[in-house]
Amino acid sequence: MKKGKYIWMNGKFVKWNDAKVHVLTHALHYGGSVYEGIRVYPVREGRKVVPTIFRLDDHLKRFVNSMADIEMKPVPVARLRKVIMELVKKNGIKDGYIRPIAFYGYERLGIYWEGLPVQISIAAMPWGVYLPKEMKLKTSKWRRLSPDSVKIEAKVGGYYINSNYATASVKGQADEALLLDHDGFIAEAACANIFFVKGKTLYTPKRGTILPGLTRDSIIELARSFGFKTVEKKIRPSEIAKFDEAFTTGTATEVTAVVKIDNKKIGNGKVGDVTAVLKDGFSDLVRGQNVHMNKAYKKWFHKIY
């Protein structure tokens, strides 16, 4: 992974290799952290390329909501936005990835976070295009965390042990794991939301047992502009066979076609037409290659000048 020059940590910019924490930090031992993944894209405006952050405020709103969900005092979005804009400039990022994280630090060793100091760090690094053409999923024996056990829509670091277990359980058998929820309905992939397609209609698991991703939300909006309908519903594994296409959405992988689940083809086992339209449409949108679309979704972009 490429590095940035600086990381913003607890109110100041420090050199990349100097961003350090104590070994007894609560987040290392008990998972008391929340984070976001945000993309910076090179958007061409005439002869000039302008680094542009996609859905910055929406990510930051989720970030501070996640902070509140683990009893941290939220930081104003405006302050975080200002820091991120400055950090992207200082690191010279044109095509990259931003990782804000808030975590409970060290003052004493104990499982409950009450009274522990809250530390916030933000990293910004080069990323580049990461667009796998297609992938295969396998249903994991591990279930998605239950909303009866955790605040399911918070993006908490500790929750991703669940994703790691799921990924390990299908290693060598598929590209990524598919998780069912506590009732046996399809939830999401290990690190991405999932959509199915039948005709011109998209189907995706409803909120309540998933992390409602911002790329997921963007695709629902984009699908509407292309004339596709989206239905959010509970989906049983037995329904997979009836769908023509499937794809996942996420910040890192954007839109990725799913051609097999549990060694069974989805549709004809190739990238579907609807998936291709949405994949190309999203890529064009975030990279500023569709002027009309970018005007329609102007609110999603923060330019770095």
Image (cartoon, grey):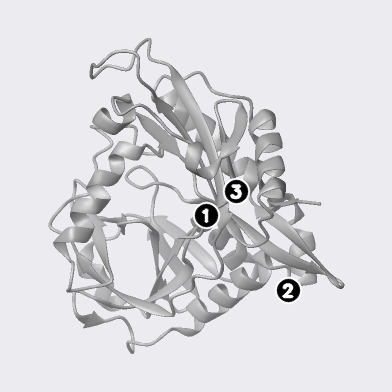
Looking at the picture, how far across and down is residue 130, in whole percent? 49, 70
Q: Is residue 288 above or below residue 149?
A: below
Q: Quadrant of residue 31?
A: top left
Label 3: which secondary element: loop
Q: Is residue 30 left or right of residue 253?
A: left
Q: Give the structural element (helix, strand or loop) at label 1.
A: loop
Query: Does 93 sit above or below residue 87?
Result: below
Q: Amino acid at mark 3?
A: Lys
Per the image, the residue denoted by label 1 is 3
Query: Which residue sits at x=43%, y=33%?
Result: 20
Cβ–Cβ under 8 Å for marks 3 and 1: yes
Q: Image check: 130 left or right of 147?
A: right
Secondary structure category for the residue under label 2: loop
Task: Count residues near mark 1 (Cα–Cα under 10 Å), then give few for <14, some for 14-19, many for 20+.
Answer: some
Q: Quadrant of residue 278?
A: bottom right
From the top left corner, tell me how far across and down residue 240 is, in percent. Answer: 27, 72
Q: Marks 2 and 3, Cα distance to the nearest angstrom?
A: 29 Å
Instruction: Return the x and y of residue 55 as percentages of the image width and height.
Output: 63, 50
Label 3: how many Cα within 10 Å (few below 14, some 14–19, many 20+):
some
Which residue is found at the position 25% from the left and 63% from the top?
Answer: 177
User: Please, which residue is most extreme toward the right here?
Assistant: 46
Task: Judge by depth and name the residue closer to the eye, 36 or 298.
Answer: 36
Q: Which residue is mark 2?
A: 289
Question: What is the number of the mark on residue 5?
Answer: 3
Q: Is tag 2's residue or tag 3's residue first in the polypeptide sequence?
A: 3
* Viewer-side residue, 195 vs 177: 177
Question: Disc 1 or 2, which lies upstream in sequence?
Answer: 1
